[in-house]
Image (cartoon, rainbow, N blue to C red):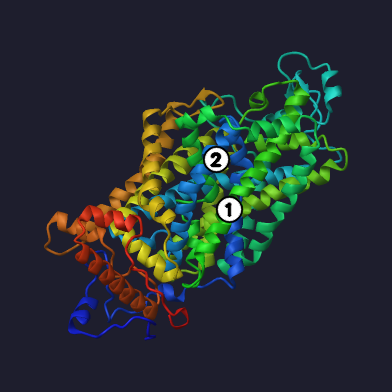
């Protein structure tokens, strides 16, 4: 076994006896010397460091930035939303992202297998799979819509550019400039752009109510949905060996197109008003808890935390990879892209308000999915030079953004099943799960599909994932322990965990998230779609998804405790199940042994200080929180 520089480990009978146990009351895990190497050792790794970084960028920088962020900002007052969002990214998004990236790399396991850190909470990983499956099921249907628009853009005239004879009387051609629009004969009622009518009535054939059902899937959208799933399957067919190669294009191409669209949008009349609406802070809204809640929800969706893909991607890293650097790069780029996407769409909204003669930008179009599939096409239709080219580029960019995120989300599901059934071929699981995903996605391309999409997003993609993330934080930092986790991180990245991370992980982030959750319960209102109430049956289905995901925590906790055949009391079994199992830790044997010795040495240093200063339990916890114990040990990384 390689020696660890600067540390001397005398062999003793006491140490030998300790190494044969599974754990101790201090959360320090011990390795059974006869334990075989974990199967995760044979896990494939990224071909190079850049593939991992590009994959993370393509995962986090997706439709959440260009589609969901703008409409969430739009619904919450533009600039009123921006400041809370940036603060939430700093105190919740970044700490959670780094936590999950480090968890995956440290264990080389999926979002389910990492819970060897505390088997009592294994259900968190299972519940996250339920949430991730919910998100993937509707996410790919949005990709199918982008495919429809890509191929529709090859027409000699963009099909949404002008009103057709059988469209509404108050329809206004999206291709008209402001003077022509004001001179048009569409004066009956509030004007509606042709791009909005095209999306809602022609593409979606959307129903005004789903009281009588959601209808049958549209055959054209079914083909686009099938094509989208085929692309995702092909990207994932060989795991990271294939997805890593595609990641370069998935990560870089969207920026090129987004910048081109932004430059063009800023030249439109009224664009400046839209940008001002987006960036002008409304300080009074900082006291509005609803805005903070929406900022937290958007942060989760944008960074894909609490869903598994961050853990999955980082589990293919080399143990010594600089995950700290990559976490900083990805979270910063994600924020930049959200701002870029926001400026682009609010420039277009400003122009749309100017053209329609509407002073209040917040009332230009309906929010939700339509903001990307109405506002962007409307602006593109006004382009003087080859609008078809810009339309193809834009919707292909949305397609690429969607595929990048969907590959990560779906890959997290496949990897979790692969870890559970390692003898199955990866591509077999990918094919089976992709087929199931396609069949599930048919629900969202029905006339009532957008109703279901919003409902599933609310209960399965937002509420469920958020609650599980709170439990995840509590399990890692308050049960496994902040001191233990910081020791693990410091051993892996050989970098002292700073005060910012300790305060966020140990205190600010979990308390902030709990406070937002309590507010959500106190002010809870039943979800609506376009201001209309859902039928009771639909709400029951949505609530079932949430309860089913949350129940996984309880079910697997009971399963773990009842599976303990020892004669301990029930409380003793619960306490034991909350501690790390013998499988927790690095996957390779020599790294695992070095880690255990490192933790013993770090704990010994910390205990000496506590004993010398006679610190109470509360003082000890505060010292750990503020990083006041000198228990960091510099290793010779070349010999680890």
Q: Nearer the viewer, residue 75 or 146?
A: 75
User: Which percent across, then down, holds residue 435?
Assistant: 54, 54
* Vertical comparison of 529 with 555: above or below: above
Marking on residue 357:
none
Q: Estimate how packed mark 1 is, as few (under 14), some (14 to 19) or many (20 or more) residues with alpha carbons within 10 Å.
A: some
The image shows residue 126, relative to residue 214, as above or below, that is below
Q: Quadrant of the C terminus?
A: bottom left
C-alpha distance separating marks 1 and 2 = 35 Å
Residue 346 in sight in this render: yes
Can you name the residue that lies furthest to the front here? 613
Q: Is residue 604 above or below residue 381?
A: below
Q: Quadrant of the N terminus?
A: bottom left
Q: Position of residue 331 (x, y in %)?
A: 55, 53
Q: For the residue labelled by badge 2, is the local secondary structure a helix, a strand or a loop?
A: helix
Quadrant in the picture for residue 146: top right
In the rendered image of this protein, does residue 419 appear above or below residue 213? below
Q: Residue at x 23, y 52 (%)?
A: 618
Q: Which residue is mark 2?
A: 443
Q: Residue at x 60, y 64 (%)?
A: 243
Q: Secondary structure at mark 1?
A: helix
Residue ID at (35%, 45%): 550
Nearest the viewer among 508 and 389 is 508
Front in this rendered view, residue 445 or 37: 37
Along the polypeptide, which appears first: circle 1 or circle 2? 1
Q: Is disc 1 in contact with disc 2, using a CB cutoff of under 8 Å?
A: no
Tell me residue 432's x, y (percent): 51, 58
Identify the mark at residue 332; answer none if there is no mark.
1
Q: Position of residue 410 (x, y in %)?
A: 53, 55
Q: Is residue 577 left or right of residue 473?
A: left
Which residue sits at x=41%, y=77%? 635
């Amino acid at each position: 076994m390689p020696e660890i520089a600067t540390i001397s480990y005398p062999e003793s009978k006491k140490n030998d006896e300790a190494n044969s146990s599974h754990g101790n009351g201090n959360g320090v895990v011990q390795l059974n010397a006869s334990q075989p190497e974990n199967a995760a050792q044979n896990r494939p790794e990224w071909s190079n460091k850049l593939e991992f970084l590009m994959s993370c960028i393509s995962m986090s920088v997706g439709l959440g930035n260009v589609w969901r962020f703008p409409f969430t900002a739009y619904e919450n007052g533009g600039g009123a939303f921006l400041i809370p969002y940036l603060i939430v990214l700093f105190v919740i998004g970044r700490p959670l992202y780094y936590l999950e990236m480090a968890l995956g790399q440290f264990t080389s396991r999926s979002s389910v297998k990492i819970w060897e850190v505390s088997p009592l909470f294994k259900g968190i990983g299972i519940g996250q799979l339920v949430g991730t499956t919910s998100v993937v099921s509707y996410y790919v249907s949005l990709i199918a819509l982008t495919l429809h628009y890509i191929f529709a853009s090859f027409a000699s005239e963009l099909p949404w550019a002008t009103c057709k004879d059988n469209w509404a009387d108050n329809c206004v051609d999206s291709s008209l400039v402001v003077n022509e629009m004001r001179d048009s004969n569409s004066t009956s009622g509030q004007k509606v752009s042709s791009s909005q009518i095209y999306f809602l009535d022609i593409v979606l054939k959307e129903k005004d109510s789903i009281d009588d059902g959601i209808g049958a899937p549209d055959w054209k959208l079914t083909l686009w949905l099938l094509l989208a799933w085929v692309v995702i399957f092909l990207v994932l067919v060989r795991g990271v060996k294939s997805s890593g190669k595609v990641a370069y294009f998935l990560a870089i191409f969207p920026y090129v197109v987004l910048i081109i669209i932004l430059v063009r949008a800023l030249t439109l009349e009224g664009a400046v008003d839209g940008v001002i609406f987006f960036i002008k802070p409304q300080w009074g809204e900082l006291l509005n808890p609803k805005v903070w809640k929406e900022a937290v929800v958007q942060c989760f969706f944008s960074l894909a935390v609490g869903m598994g893909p961050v853990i999955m991607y980082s589990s293919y890293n080399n143990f010594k990879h600089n995950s700290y650097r990559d976490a900083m790069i990805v979270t910063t780029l994600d924020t930049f892209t959200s701002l870029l996407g926001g400026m682009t769409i609010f420039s277009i909204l400003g122009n749309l308000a100017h053209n329609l003669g509407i002073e209040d930008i917040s009332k230009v179009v309906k929010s939700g999915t339509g903001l990307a599939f109405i506002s962007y096409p409307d602006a593109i239709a006004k382009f003087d030079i080859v609008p078809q080219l810009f339309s193809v580029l834009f919707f292909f960019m949305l397609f690429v953004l969607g595929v990048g995120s969907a590959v990560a989300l779906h890959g997290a599901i496949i990897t979790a099943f692969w870890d559970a059934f390692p003898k199955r071929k990866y591509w077999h699981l990918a094919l089976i799960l992709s087929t199931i995903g396609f069949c599930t996605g048919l629900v969202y391309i029905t006339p009532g599909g957008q109703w279901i999409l919003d409902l599933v997003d609310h209960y399965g993609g937002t509420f469920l994932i958020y609650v599980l993330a709170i439990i995840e934080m509590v399990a890692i930092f308050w049960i496994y322990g902040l001191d233990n986790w910081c020791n693990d991180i410091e051993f892996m990245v050989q970098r002292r965990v700073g005060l910012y991370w300790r305060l966020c992980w140990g205190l600010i982030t979990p308390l902030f998230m709990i406070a937002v959750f309590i507010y959500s319960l106190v002010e809870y209102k039943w979800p609506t779609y376009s201001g209309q109430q859902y039928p009771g049956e639909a709400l029951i289905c949505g609530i079932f998804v949430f309860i089913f995901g949350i129940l996984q925590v309880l079910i697997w906790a009971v399963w773990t405790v009842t599976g303990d055949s020892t004669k301990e009391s029930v409380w003793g079994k619960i306490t034991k199940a909350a501690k790390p199992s013998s499988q927790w830790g690095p996957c390779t044997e020599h790294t695992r042994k070095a880690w255990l010795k490192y933790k013993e040495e770090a704990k010994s240093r910390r205990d000496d200080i506590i004993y010398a200063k006679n610190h109470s339990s509360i003082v000890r916890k505060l010292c750990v929180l503020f990083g006041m114990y000198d228990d960091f040990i510099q290793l010779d990384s070349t010999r680890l």
